[in-house]
Image: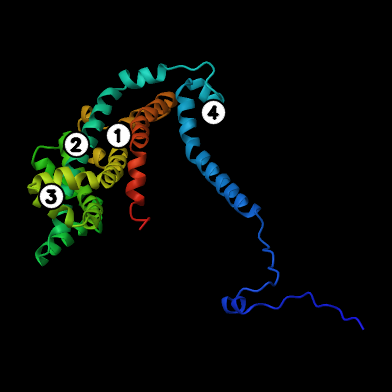
């Protein structure tokens, strides 16, 4: 009598202990197409958002190269042929060269004031251990919670008493003071993340406090500096409120206030307005192109930990 041989193998003791048997594994229902679909949807969303964001800029540049009649008859048409007369008229006739210099002076000056004061205050707050400095830090940070626009009347009367209205240097002081709370808060966080051993090692090597601060600590917080500089440059450059209230002389106007000259009571000079907007946008585009890497490093420096 022949017997059938059982070819099935019993699981070994080692396999039972380790939890591994020869049972067939179930195939995952997930396919390799899932990551591709996710990337595709993400790319479609990002490209769509980019078109929505860049669309107004393209329309602005496009209409700045056209005439008033072309814009009135066909607002979305192409500049055929392109003309640069509106740029020449905006720069020379409408005194945009003066407004541009005023905006550069106010923005760069206020950013320098904000950065210098904030970086020194942030380093002091990050390394101070006394409770007295905690109170001063709270006073600095309280500026983030105050509605600064409500103080425009006392500020105007103060500057008028000091004979500083219609003076771009008054805007430098105002913007510089307004940017200190936020910039100090951001830089304090970065300085506290730096190990104290770096300063102790520099002190052992004979470096003084100033040299340690300038040559060791500042290069380490350079991404944070680039981030706060851009975050202060953009709102100051685009601000319309304070120049409108604090500046009386037309020769001291900044670009946002100067653009109002193209709005007439009965008509608007659209080519020169778009040309002025294009001129005002160029420095921001250049700034972002130059500082993109530093901004990304500053915003994501703590995400990898």
What residue is disc 1 on?
Answer: 257
Tell me how far mark 4 sits from mark 3, CA to CA.
Answer: 63 Å
Earlier-in-chain disc, 2 versus 1: 2
Q: Pointer 1: residues within 10 angstroms few (<14), some, or many (20+)?
A: some
On the image, the x and y values in percent for residue 117 come to 15, 47
In the picture of the structure, the residue carrying the numbered disc 3 is: 202
Residue 75's disc is 4
The residue closer to the viewer here, 126 or 250, is: 126
Residue 66 as seen in the image, left or right of residue 40? left
Position of residue 171 measured from the top left corner of the image (x, y, whole percent): 19, 39
Sequence-earlier tag: 1 or 4: 4
Q: How is the image coloured?
A: rainbow
The image shows residue 72 at horizontal and vertical percentages of: 52, 25
Is 2 situated left or right of 24 in this image? right
Q: Which of pointers 4 and 2 lies earlier in the amino acid sequence?
A: 4
The answer to whether marks 4 and 3 mark residues whose Cβ atoms lie closer than 8 Å is no
The C terminus - image quarter: bottom left
């Amino acid at each position: 009598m022949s017997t059938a041989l059982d070819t099935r193998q019993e699981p070994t003791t080692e396999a039972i202990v380790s939890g591994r048997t020869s049972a067939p594994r179930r195939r995952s229902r997930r396919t390799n197409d899932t990551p591709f679909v996710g990337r595709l949807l993400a790319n479609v969303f990002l490209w769509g958002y980019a078109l929505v964001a860049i669309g107004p800029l393209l329309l602005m540049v496009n209409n700045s190269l056209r005439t008033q009649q072309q814009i009135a008859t066909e607002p979305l048409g192409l500049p055929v042929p392109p003309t640069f007369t509106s740029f020449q008229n905006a720069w020379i006739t409408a005194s945009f060269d003066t407004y541009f210099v005023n905006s550069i002076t106010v923005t760069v000056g206020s950013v320098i004031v904000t950065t210098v004061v904030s970086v020194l205050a942030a380093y002091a707050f990050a390394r101070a251990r006394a409770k007295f400095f905690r109170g001063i830090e709270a006073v600095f940070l309280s500026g983030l919670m105050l509605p600064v626009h409500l103080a425009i009347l006392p500020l105007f009367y103060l500057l008028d008493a000091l004979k500083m209205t219609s003076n771009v240097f008054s805007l430098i002081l105002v913007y510089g003071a307004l940017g200190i709370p936020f910039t100090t808060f951001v830089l304090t966080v970065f300085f506290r993340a730096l190990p104290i051993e770096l300063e102790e090692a520099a002190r052992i090597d004979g470096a003084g406090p100033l040299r340690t601060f300038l040559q060791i600590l500042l290069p380490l917080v350079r991404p944070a500096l680039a981030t706060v500089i851009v975050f202060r440059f953009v709102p100051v450059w685009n601000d319309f409120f304070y120049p409108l209230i604090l500046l009386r002389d037309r020769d001291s106007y900044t670009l946002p206030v100067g653009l109002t000259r193209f709005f007439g009571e009965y008509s608007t000079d659209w080519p020169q307005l778009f040309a002025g907007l294009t001129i005002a946008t160029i420095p921001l585009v250049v700034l972002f192109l130059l500082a993109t890497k530093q901004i990304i490093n500053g915003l994501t420096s703590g995400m990898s930990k």
